[in-house]
Image (cartoon, rainbow, N blue to C red):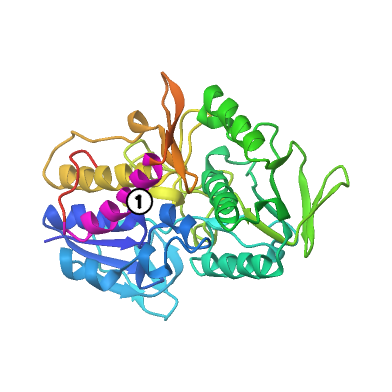
Amino acid sequence: MKNVLVLGGGFAGIDAAVHLKKLGYYVTLVSDRDYFYVYPTSIWVPTHDAKFADVCVDLSKLQKAHGFELIIDGVKEISYKQNEITLESGKVLNNYDYLILAMGASKMQPKGVENTLSICGAPEQSLQIRDKLDALIAKGSGKIAMGFGGNPKDTSAVRGGPGFELMFNVHNMLKRKGIRENFELTFFAPMEEPGKRMGPQALQMMDKFFTRLNIKKHFGQKITHFETDGIVFEDESKLEADFTMFIPAGDGHSVVKNSDLPQNEAGFVKTDDYSCVLDENANMTNVYAIGDVAALEGYDWRAKQGHIAEVMAKNAAHNIYQRDNGGFDFEGYHKHLNILCVMDSGDGAAFVYRDEKRAFMFPLPIIGHWLKKGWGFYCKNSKLGNIPRIPGM
């Protein structure tokens, strides 16, 4: 039985471990936290529509359900050429036949970012956002700014959807409390048309949402830095805010940047379409990179999302099995590239889809919110093996 070492306990890492176990491999998963965090449903923690525990799955329960080995530790160093991993504890792992990198990405660090909190940052920040909002509600009024940034070295590393969702959910929370008119809500981004990657129809609908909900916009100006009371832009204008939620663009993982792994300009791991890392002679190695840690190649509108990470995880497991059994029926991720999300607003949602042939967005009043709630239940319980996974997912 061959050994596979999986680094990362997110969507990509968990799915890789599960699929590999089903194929008969001995799998060890390393994660720097002891729970799997369901980021897409964390948008409800700040508005008290979900508890922190509701968006977490204990990794020991996943371990018990699927039978992989589990190490709770951080990754300190990677040397893929030496076939060696050093953990934060000092433990060295080198007894593996295949290595799967699924550690996610680091975040860009614009000046003053410590004055902000991110719904896509460390999980604990969702609780800190909740507390900041609670304090403003107790005060009775305030200015709230939410936005996201870009990475000019890799446009796939932008994650703006959760920012839109959180803003819409905060709007509805304040509306339910009857105090919405006491708050100024502003969404900001350095690009002229944030959300453009979702397609022209989605862009038009988002603009209508902002107008209808009386959410101000500040687009098209580069952010120079953040201050305790707002955001300063390249034109020297300042957006005042009592609280700023900001989602920095993804950046290459710090451990990857300090490794001997092949990387793109932004520090993401370069692979072929089959998620395999190639050596300097373009030969397949025993290393695979999946999810946010990997350089995602393809369309200009491509985006790193959880369902793409899961596709890459399933493919990596399949491709490893093919290699070990003399097969060449490898599966690539590029043909699966699309944008797919249910953008929740607290009182409904909008379904967004884009691939190389089409792009559309349509509203799902009321039912959309419960569809996303249902997906959260499905995500947790299907990964635990309590309910069957939908075929192809």
Quadrant assignment, res 218? top right
Quadrant assignment, res 39? bottom left
Amino acid type, label 1? Lys
Q: Name the residue located 58 percent from the left edge and 54 percent from the top edge.
A: 170
Task: Report which residue position mark 1 lands on.
Answer: 373
* Position of residue 266 measured from the top left corner of the image (x, y, whole percent): 58, 47
Q: Is residue 203 left or right of residue 293?
A: right
**Where 377 falls versus 310 (above or below)?**
below
- The answer to whether residue 296 is magenta is no
Q: Farthest residue toward the front?
A: 178
**Which is nearer the eye, 135 or 80?**
135
Q: Name the residue located 58 percent from the left edge and 33 percent from the top edge.
A: 206
Few, some or many residues within 10 Å of mark 1 (<14, 14–19, 20+): some
* Position of residue 137 measured from the top left corner of the image (x, y, whole percent): 65, 65
The quarter in which the C terminus is drawn is top left
**Over which residues does the magenta segment extend?**
367-386
* Position of residue 1 measured from the top left corner of the image (x, y, whole percent): 11, 61
Q: Name the residue located 46 percent from the left edge and 48 percent from the top edge.
A: 269
